[in-house]
Image: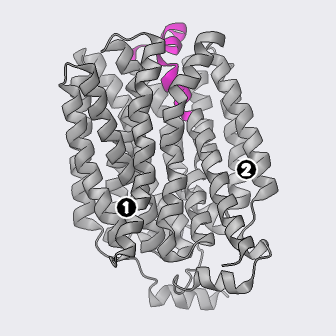
Amino acid sequence: MSKRTRRLRATAVALLVIAGCVNYFDRAAVAVGNPEIRAELGLSYSEMGLLLSAFAWSYGLAQIPAGSLVDRFGPRRTLGFGMILWSVAQLAAAAVSSLNQFVVARVALGLGESPMYLGGARVCSDWFPLKERALPISIFNASSALAPALAPPLLTWLMVVYGWRVMFIVAGVAGFAVAVLWAILYRAPEDAQIPVADIEDIRREDGEPAHQFGWRQVVWLLEFPTTWGMFLGFFGVVYISWFYATWLPGYLEAARHLSVASAGVWAAIPLGAGFAGGISGGLIADRLGRSGMDAAEACRLPIIWGLVVAGVSTIGAAYSSDIRVAVGLMAVGLFAANVSSSCGWALAAVIAPANTVATLEAVQNVGGSIGGALAPFLTGVLVQQTGSFVPAFAFAGIVAFACALAYWAMTRDKILVPPAQNRLSESTA
């Protein structure tokens, strides 16, 4: 690889990490402001659960259209438009005065952020050879854990000093800044004036490219048990991640009786461990791949074991009376869940043809988004009905076990381009 290609690859990953951090700061703002927002707007636990889940419902429903747009128009245009939309939505959230207005703002945020991780996976597929993709995807995906780790102390400080609405203003302005950087600095390999030999080296192991045909591509992908295994399995990955991301500060305040400032500091520990898990997932998959293991299997095994460990740790945390032990177990749980998350995103990039990656990621992330939507809502309902967080923790652990089983049983085969699709590509060329 030429020096220019290596420099542009590093720039692309750095931009994705920055955008991913801002992306998750936006998502975390409601969780950090949970008690204050609930008090000012007069919301019950169930209504707060609805607000926390509104983002994930629109995000999930938009995944397949967003994946098709990324595959059709490329990540530069699709992500650029998404960044502008999500920044407008975040600024709008700072001005709400009712639950309904807040839900609308969160729905718009979900639509704007829907191409982010699909486009990021496509960027890594465009810039890195097959056997080198797990690590950059994991580094990028780790932003989904880095931002929640940084968000509680930083956003809590903004909220304590300036009020919860300022959190949303700062995040919205940051989103616009990232959109400008993305438009100026990012280009696809074919548009970046890199040597043709470098492009050929990146594409060498991808095989026959798939024809981009939108919803028919989705239908074709659904013919594979592996697609369904990724759909069902990622439900658990995101469920347990969002269980912590949306309710952890509120749980520490309500169940562990910490102050707002203390909850922000303690919450950063498990969320920081989640960031370490996101990075470690890529390193684990990369090490297994370099040892000679099949690239798909090197991603699949850490996903399964990560979910198992996350389930055990989450249930253990619910029953611990010592806050230090509980937070330690939650840290292990989030570390393991983010190992699974990083390897889950990497799996799609090595298990399917290059031009189907974003669409397959979209199908997978629909399952994840359903988990992300149900986690905060069901947690709120369970707490409202039982007066305790213990059933919510136990249920999250059971979900993790069930989804580990889905990955183990259903994701053993790769997705190959069928002859019929190749004929379709030739006939429409």
Q: Is residue 288 above or below residue 363?
A: below
- Disc 2 marks a residue whose amino acid type is Phe
Closer to us: 335 or 82: 335
Closer to us: 320 or 354: 320
Q: What's the residue at 44%, 86% (across, down)?
A: 418
- Label located before the other in sequence (2 or 1): 2
Q: Is residue 287 visible from the viewing direction of this image?
A: yes
- Disc 1 marks a residue whose amino acid type is Ile
Position of residue 373 measured from the top left corner of the image (x, y, whole percent): 42, 38
Residue 121 highlighted magenta (yes or no): no
Q: What's the residue at 33%, 30% (across, down)?
A: 378
Q: CA distance from mark 2 to mark 1?
A: 34 Å
Position of residue 147 measured from the top left corner of the image (x, y, whole percent): 54, 37
Position of residue 40 measured from the top left corner of the image (x, y, whole percent): 54, 8
Badge 2 element:
helix
The residue where tag 1 is placed is: 284
Q: What's the residue at 40%, 45% (across, down)?
A: 370
Q: Which residues are magenta?
A: 27-45
Badge 1 element:
helix
* Quadrant (top left, top right, bottom left, bottom right) of the C terminus: bottom right
Residue 34 highlighted magenta (yes or no): yes
Viewed as shown, does residue 298 lie left or right of 127? left
The residue where tag 2 is placed is: 81
Quarter location, residue 156: top right
Q: What's the residue at 46%, 12% (across, down)?
A: 260
